[in-house]
Amino acid sequence: MTVQSGVRVAVAGAGALGSAVALRLARAGFQVTVFDPAAPGDNASGVAAGMLAPVSEALFDPASRDHLALMRRARDLWPAFAERLGIEIHRAGVRIEGSETWREQVGQKLSELGLPAGETIPEDWRIEARPALAALRSAAETAGATFDAVAVEGFAPGALLLADGRTEAFDILVLATGPGARDGQLVPETAALAPIKGQLLRTPASEGDVVVRGEGVYLAPGETLAIGATMEAGRDDLEPDASATQTLRAAAWALRPDLDLDVASVEVGVRVTTPDGLPLVGWSRAPGVLLAVGARRNGWLLAPLVADMVAAYLNGDHPGPDAAAMDARRFEKSGV
């Protein structure tokens, strides 16, 4: 399906993927409106450490292990993307800390990935998530996109149904929401998505500029120290759960016994994932709907890549070497 610029595009979801898509399309001449009922930054992309960390993801998340090359290509788009937005990329890397046994296990995994073992992973970067979301929104608005704080409930080409009862005229819907997209009712492909609840702690403690990765925990510096994160498969509630964060606190104390976690705040986000850990990107079987959803915990890392792919699909261009891996209908084809 080829769509000419200038048509009306609704983007459902104002997280990293949705905001990056909106910016890319607005700059390309599409008439873009982003729909999201949440306050700016009050989503899983805001509740994030902002990691652009392909090696760490391949090391510590089994679902990402086979996607290192793809994630590196996504990370390599970030310098030009961030420079234009004024987003600072912190490149101090990730330092591995913990028991000798655990560090040896990490070294073995690095070797299996064809990487040299060492105490640091210099090619893993990070950004500040909430300021980055604000920068994306500001740039998208400057490019002509608008934002509307209401949820999308239905779509047929030419008509977008909104939760407040309005029906608005749009030619295309880009579905970039999180938990609300996964029931398969709006488009069938999202039935393959599953929720993952994530909780992280934030404390004013200082940790320099290097992200520290320990057994079962990371310490990410920034405006506050982010201590994360739980991965609670199948859960989609946003209530803080002390029982789930207790293991996280113990792992953090094992690395930094002096941390005062009694004053730490808890932030909760819900992400959605596919069975293989990569998002659904491409045309749905539902007419006029293009998917950009299900990035697991790599929404920030993949955002520029996914935005470029969405623009390519709309313009009838080739979406690039990662199109098959992220094909929106791949689970329908495989029977998963």
Image (cartoon, rainbow, N blue to C red):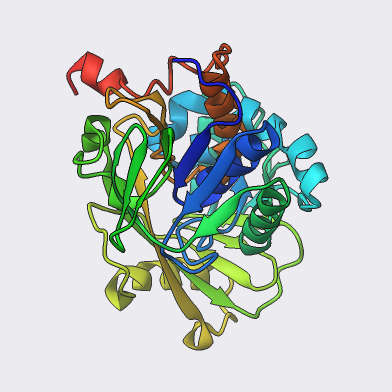
Q: Position of residue 239 (x, y in %)?
A: 30, 74
Can residue 57 be seen here? The reply is: yes
Q: Give above or below for 211 relative to 58.
A: below
Between residue 186 and residue 54, name the one nearer to us. 186
The answer to whether residue 229 is above or below residue 51 is below
- On the image, the x and y values in percent for residue 178 come to 37, 50
Q: Is residue 194 above or below residue 146?
A: above
Tell me: 212 left or right of 287: right
> Which residue is found at the position 72% from the left and 51% from the top?
139
Relative to residue 31, is residue 47 depicted above or below?
below
* Image point (46%, 61%), residue name: 43
> Can you give x and y, in whole percent of width and height, for residue 40 in the image?
54, 65
How many marks are shown on the rendered structure? 0
Picture quadrant where residue 71 is located:
top right
In this rendering, does residue 111 appear at all?
A: no
Q: Residue at x 68, y 65 (%)?
A: 221
Q: Position of residue 105 (x, y in %)?
A: 49, 39
Q: Quadrant of residue 231?
A: bottom left
